[in-house]
Amino acid sequence: MKICPSCNTQCDDNALFCQSCKSGFGVVQSPAPAPMQKAFCNRCGGSLIDGVCPKCVDAAYNPIPQAKQADPSARFRGFFMSPKEKLVCVLGNTYTQNFLASGSATMGFSVVSDKRVYFRGTTYWVDGKKIRKMSESKTVDLKDVTGTSVTYFENVWMKILGWLLLIIGGIGVLAVAEASASAFLTVLFAGALILGLYLNKGQNSTKNKKTIGAVLGCIGGGLLLVALMFALGDSAVTETVQTWGGTQTTETVPVHVWIVLAVFIIGIAFLIAYLFTRINLLRVEYAGGCIGFDVVWFPMQEADTYQKQLRLAKDKAIEEAESATANAVTSAMSQFASAVSQPVGVGQPVAVAAPVAAAPASSAQELMQYADLLEKGLITREEFDEFKAGVLKK
């Protein structure tokens, strides 16, 4: 029911005019929606975008605080010896994640905190020219680390002997096979095999070089066996033997041919063993030993970053230790200076009974403090004797 504003007569809801006074009701308009209030930055007055001011991104001035960044040290809380340690860098991030997830390490990795260096998994122990491969778990204080280096180890004698036998055997194969096509192919495929292994196991081999080397080595090795079989056929000697039944023809390979082929194959074996035994180690040296990692396990950039961050963490630890020692010595000397030279005010008596009575206890306490500093190595023996003499004079 509608009520007329002029005569207060009740009318139908659909009525456009009042039945009594004939006054019109008009079109009822719905109220306009209230405009949305914009949020403004309390610092600069600019409009906020998703609760953040684009001009001054500061949680202290915006109503919506920014999300806190994840702490990279959080996942190592159970790994570090102290929960207060902070992560500096990791060598072998993939192996580290596998270790944290499964508890086992297939390859070696290292984690550096601001206090210690952790080694886990397969590592190399270097003792002079001897290298031992082992799996261990070791922790070294950061202050005990003396340096890092990348060292290349190889068996030179194996390399020289392999090339010597390969050259002699190759010349022998060409000679006994009478420079046939199979002899040349044998030498060629042997060279392809060695080249492929060099590309795959080289000191600075990239991913593409390793792939090319693997393909070339497989093809060269397979075709080398085929060429050797044909070379043996070309080196065979035909013999005709008269028997009661007639003439019998046989083909045999002379002994000297087998010797030449054996020298050739042994030379290849020595070169392959040389390539698989040489190693490029990233060494971490510390007081009492050295631990190495094969750089093939890690990207070169990751290994370089690890060395740099480890040295910076070492320098920072040394600076903090020196600063703490200097502050302790300065504090001790300041306490001694203030205790020895106490100013006397004008009109103040030089000697007072109460302070004189309490002096022995204070002197004994000071001597105990200096003795504690001497025991910790924060002051020298000469400085302790000077402090002691000054305290006794009081």
Image: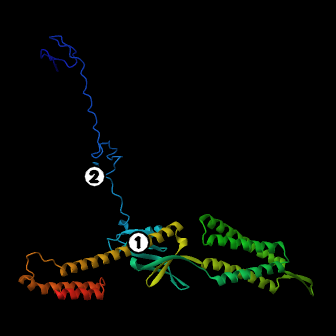
Residue 323, image x, y percentages: 33, 74
> Measured along the vertical axis of the image, is residue 184 above or below residue 242?
above
Residue 219, image x, y percentages: 70, 68
The secondary structure type at the circle numbered 2 is loop
Residue 141 visible (yes or no): no
Residue 230, image x, y percentages: 80, 74
The quadrant holding residue 19 is top left
**Disc 1/disc 2 C-alpha distance (Å):** 32 Å
Of 79 and 17, the residue lying toward us: 79
Residue identified by numbered label 1: 313
Q: Is residue 61 left or right of residue 246?
A: left
Task: Classify mark 1: residues with Cα within 10 Å, few (<14), some (14-19) or many (20+).
Answer: many
Of 232 and 133, the residue lying toward us: 133
Dots 1 and 2: beta carbons under 8 Å? no
Numbered label attached to residue 220: none
Residue identified by numbered label 2: 60
Of 340 and 280, the residue lying toward us: 340
Residue 365, image x, y percentages: 17, 84
Please give the name of the residue rendered at 48% of the width and 81% of the height, measured from the top-left corner: 290
